[in-house]
Image (cartoon, grey):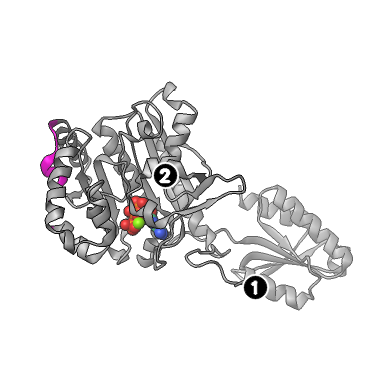
Amino acid sequence: MLTTAPKGTKDVLPGESYQWHYIENIMREVCRVYGYDEIRLPTFEHTELFLRGVGDTTDVVQKEMYTFEDKGGRSITLKPEGTAGAARMFVEHALYNEALPKRLYYLNSAHFRYERPQAGRYREHHQFGVEVFGAPQSAIDAEVIMLAMAVLRRAGLPNLEVELNSIGCSKCRPAYSQALKEYLHAHEDELCGTCRERMERNPLRVLDCKVEGCKAVAAAAPKPVDYLCQECAAHFESLKAYLQMENVKFRVNPFIVRGLDYYTRTVFEILSPDLGAQSTVCGGGRYDGLIEAVGGPQVAGIGFGMGMERLLLALEKMNVDIPKPERVQLYVAPMGEEASLAAFDLVSRLRQAGVKAETDCVGRSLKAQLKYANKLDCAFVAVVGSDELAGGAWRVRDMMGGEETTRTPEEIFQMLTEATK
Ligand code: ATP
Ligand code: MG
C-alpha cells in the first residue's frame, strides 16, 4: 500500500514531464492568439453544484463522483468536470457585468471520476478546457471547435475526426423527449436498471449509457436532429457553413448526446481513431441554460474538455517526436575542497546568466563524477584540481566532439554565455 499509488492514478515521472510542457505550451500559445484568458479554479466544490450543473441523472453524478462530508459537515465533491465550476465562478464574481463574450481556458485541471481504470481512463485525469460565456451565435461554436483542432494539429496528431450533432433547446427538446420516451417504453426490458429508472425523468441519458443492451436500443432510437425547432436547425446549419468555409472536415453523428445534462444545441467530439477504445480526445458543446441553472442570469455558454493524458497517449501511439528538454551545458568535476568552491562559484555564475550547469555536491571521486556526467548527457565537462587551480587553466572536454582544451573559468563562462545568447 505505502509504495503503491491508488488505483486509477498516475505519476508523471521526471523523464516524462517535458511531454506535458510540450502540450501545455501549445495550449497556451493557441489560447493566446485566440484571445482566451486562463482561469484556475478549486479542485473541490459543493456537491450541490454538480447535482444542478451536471445533472443528477447523469452517469457522472450517479456513478462516478468522489463525494465526502468534510469536518464541518458540508458535502464536498472533487470536481468530475470543469464547466460547472467555471459557471459558478462566472456567477459568483458577476463576470456577466463585464464585456462579453468572456473567453476562458484552464489547463492541468485535475478531474476525478470513479471509473474502471484502463488505458486512457483514470480515476484522476487532467483536462485542458475552454469556456466562452455570453456568445449565443454559431460563429463561436465554430471558433471553439477550431481552437481545439488547432491545439491537436499543432501537437502533431494526424487523422483527427470531428463529430457534430445538435440536441436542440428547451423549446424543441420536450417534443423530442416525448418521442424518445415512447420508444424507450417499447424497449424497456432491454434496458439496464439505471436507464429504466432515469428514462422517465431524463430519457436522453439512455442514449449515452455504456451498457451494451442500452447501446443497441439507442442505435435505433429517434434522433434529436429530426426534432429541431427552426432556430436550432438554423444554428446548426450556420455552424456547418462556418466549418466548411474554414475547411474543417466533420461528420454529423446523430447519436452524440454527451454525458452531462447541461448541453443544448451543438455537441461535438474530436476523435483520434488510432487511439483504440478510448478514442475521444476532446468533447464539448453549447450549454445555454447552465448559467441560469447555477443561479445566474440567462447567459449563453459553450466549451470543451480535452483529456491531457489521452492526448499524450495519442502522441505516443502516433510516434510524434516531442522535442527533448535542453541538456546540461556544463558539468564541473572538482577534485578537492578548494576546487569544489571554485566549481560551485562558476556554476552559480553560469546559472545566474541562464546557462544550465551542474557540479558535484555529494563528494564523489573524479571517476564516479565522470560516470555521472556521462549519464547526464551534458555538452561540456570541466575538470578542476589543485594543478588546474594553481595554473588557472581548467580542462574542458567537448562531450560531442571529444576534444579537450584548457580554459580559464572566465573563458568557460564567456564561451557558454555566448552560446546561449
Ligand atoms: P468517455 O466517453 O471517454 O467516458 P466523457 O464523455 O466522459 O468521455 P468528458 O466528460 O467529455 O468525457 O471529458 C472530456 C475529455 O476528458 C474526454 O474526451 C477525455 O479525453 C477525457 N476524459 C474523460 N474521462 C477520462 C478519464 N476517466 N480518464 C482520462 N481522460 C478522461
Ligand atoms: Mg465518461
- Is 169 situated left or right of 368 in this image? left
Residue 357, x across and y down, in percent: 69, 58
Q: Nearer the viewer, residue 205 or 339?
A: 205
Residue denoted by label 2: 50
Sequence order check, earlier mark of 1 and 2: 2
Q: Residue at x 43, y 60 (%)?
A: 114
- Does residue 153 appear in the picture of this structure? no
What distance separates the C-alpha of mark 1 from that of mark 2?
52 Å
Tell me if residue 338 comes above or below residue 221 in the rendering.
below
Q: Nearer the viewer, residue 282 or 408?
A: 282
Q: Is the Cβ of the residue at disc 1 closer than 8 Å to that at disc 2?
A: no
- Is 121 situated left or right of 9 in this image? left
Tell me if residue 61 comes above or below residue 13 in the rendering.
above
Q: Quadrant of ligand 1?
A: bottom left
- Does residue 147 appear in the picture of this structure? yes
Residue 264, x across and y down, in percent: 26, 39
What are the residue bounds of the magenta stretch? 220-230
Provide the secondary structure element on which disc 1 rests: helix
| Quadrant of res 342 | bottom right
Residue 84, x across and y down, in percent: 41, 41
Kind of residue indicated by mark 2: Phe
| Quadrant of res 132 | top left
Residue denoted by label 1: 374
